[in-house]
Image (spheres, helix red, strand yellow):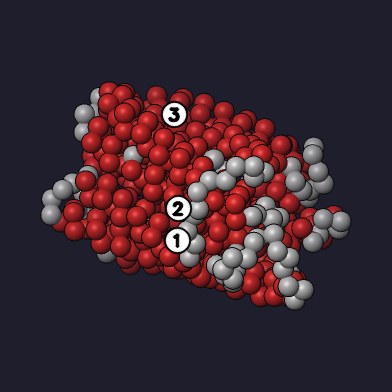
Amino acid sequence: MRRPRGRSDRTPAPARAPLGLGHHAARGAFVTLGGQGLRIVIQVLSVALLARVLSPQDYGLIAMVVVIVGVGEIFRDFGLSSAAIQAPTLSREQRDNLFWINTGIGLTLGAVVFVAAGAVAALYDQPELVGIARLLSVTFLLNGIATQYRADLVRHLRFGALAMADVLAPVIALGVAMAFAVAGFGYWALVAQTLAQTTTLLIAYAVSARWFPRLPHRGVEMRGLLRFGWRLVGTQLIGYASNNVDSFVIGLRFGAGSLGLYNRAFHLLMTPLNQLRAPTTTVALPVLSRLQDDDLRYAEFIRRGQLALGYTLVAALGVVATAAEPIVEIFLGPRWETVVPLLRLLAVAGIFQTLSYVGYWIYLSRNLTGDLLRYTMVTAAIKVVCILVGSTWGVIGVAAGYAVAPALAWPLSLWWLSRRTVIPTRALMTGALRILAVVACAAGVAAVVDLTLVAHPAPLRLAVTAVTTVAVYALGGLVLPPLRRDISGVLAIARLGASRGALL
């Protein structure tokens, strides 16, 4: 709900506010999940449409710039959006100062990228990157201006406005990109798409927030907000470096065309997957926070949470790994067939990432952020080593290294957490092994069935693979008691999540 004009954020909330918190949170979760669903549809549609007009070279050139300048986005935010959101109180003066800090950082980074465009092009030996980098440098300033507008909407639970902006922007950007692509502008269509989306988000956030920043204020306490942001930047930088080393290595060693192929496989799978996993943390953390003093119930929720992710997202990733060929044909087109093995390997990576995702809930709910930073550094090193070793065998090797890394990090995460807090280590391990066994069995059966349908249309093959997977799970639930208990646990955690508004 928007604050009345002129009211300070320090003003105490009305006494009845806590009674409405559950309603706002539950409604916010519903709106956020709905908005995420629409964004995923738009992103998949964008991939499918533009892939039929643009080439791997076009995507590769943009990815080369993004992987280098993307690190600047972390510094541009400087963790100050999260600092503003989590602050118990935030005065208007502090908000104004945060706005100008983010805007100043964005302007500075934009200027740095503009000047360094030639160096980026020389690094990859691609002269086209000079113009691309200089145009994309504008996004630092636009995003810097938008940062505190978005933070203000989140702080005041304006989830509807956020969802509207986050859906409207990619729709407009896709329309702009298609117009440029059809007109024959090649990779400039992707540049235009990025600029259109960034501009639309800024306008939508500013209009919805309905406030205008005043000039910076002296004598306002900012140290706590800046300290929070700086600590968060460290973790984000490590995560960004490890998450983008694959694209950097491919672009540097194998060129824009190979990077474009890898980039399309990654965006077709990993971007929607991340957007599906992220809301589960929003649902899980409030529940876990209420179970802090009850180790048995806490452990049971974690165990069931892993099962819920395993029998939904992991099962879907098994379908992707099996039906990668028809999926690529449907969403990218026949000329992208070399993406098939990359998509399969990325699906395997997604499986192990998802199994270990509940560990992230534990780190946050137990306030183990220091351990999370150290663990992130270790897993980042594992990923870098796997990808560098895999790159010896080309782009496929990079994708294989990307898949091996989370398979190694997943059991390490359980061991690490078991030494820091009470978790159901054995239950999580055995539950994950059951999930993997069922996924492997379903994928094997579906692969055999798919071999008999090679000559049939891709949509039919994908549908049969999905139906076969569901049938294997259903049959396993009927004849195997442990699997049946797992499914019952998943249903229980779904009911608990549905009652979240009442719990709050």
First reached walking from the N terminus: tag 2 or tag 3:
2
Residue 444, numbered label: none
Q: Position of residue 410 (x, y in %)?
A: 63, 41
Residue position marked by numbered label 1 in the rendering: 205
Give left or right: position of 212 versus 139: right
Q: CA distance from mark 1 to mark 3?
A: 42 Å
Q: Are marks 2 and 3 in contact (CB under 8 Å)?
A: no
Q: CA distance from mark 2 to mark 3?
A: 39 Å
Residue at image coords 61%, 36%: 230
Q: Is residue 472 visible?
A: no
Dot 3 lies on which element?
helix
Residue position marked by numbered label 3 in the rendering: 390
First reached walking from the N terminus: tag 2 or tag 1:
2
Residue at image coords 45%, 61%: 205
Q: CA distance from mark 2 to mark 1?
A: 7 Å
Q: Position of residue 67 (x, y in %)?
A: 39, 36
Q: Residues within 10 Å of mark 1 (few under 14, many from 20)?
A: many
Residue at image coords 71%, 55%: 88
Q: Position of residue 296 (x, y in %)?
A: 84, 57
Looking at the rendered structure, the kind of residue marked 2 is Ala
Q: Are marks 2 and 1 in contact (CB under 8 Å)?
A: yes
The N terminus: image quadrant: bottom right
Frontmost residue, 181 versus 8: 8
Looking at the rendered structure, the kind of residue marked 1 is Tyr
Q: Are marks 1 and 3 in contact (CB under 8 Å)?
A: no
Residue position marked by numbered label 2 in the rendering: 146
Frontmost residue, 116 versus 279: 116
Residue at image coords 75%, 46%: 367
Vertical placement of residue 351 versus 465, above or below: above
User: Residue 49: which quarter of the image?
Assistant: bottom left
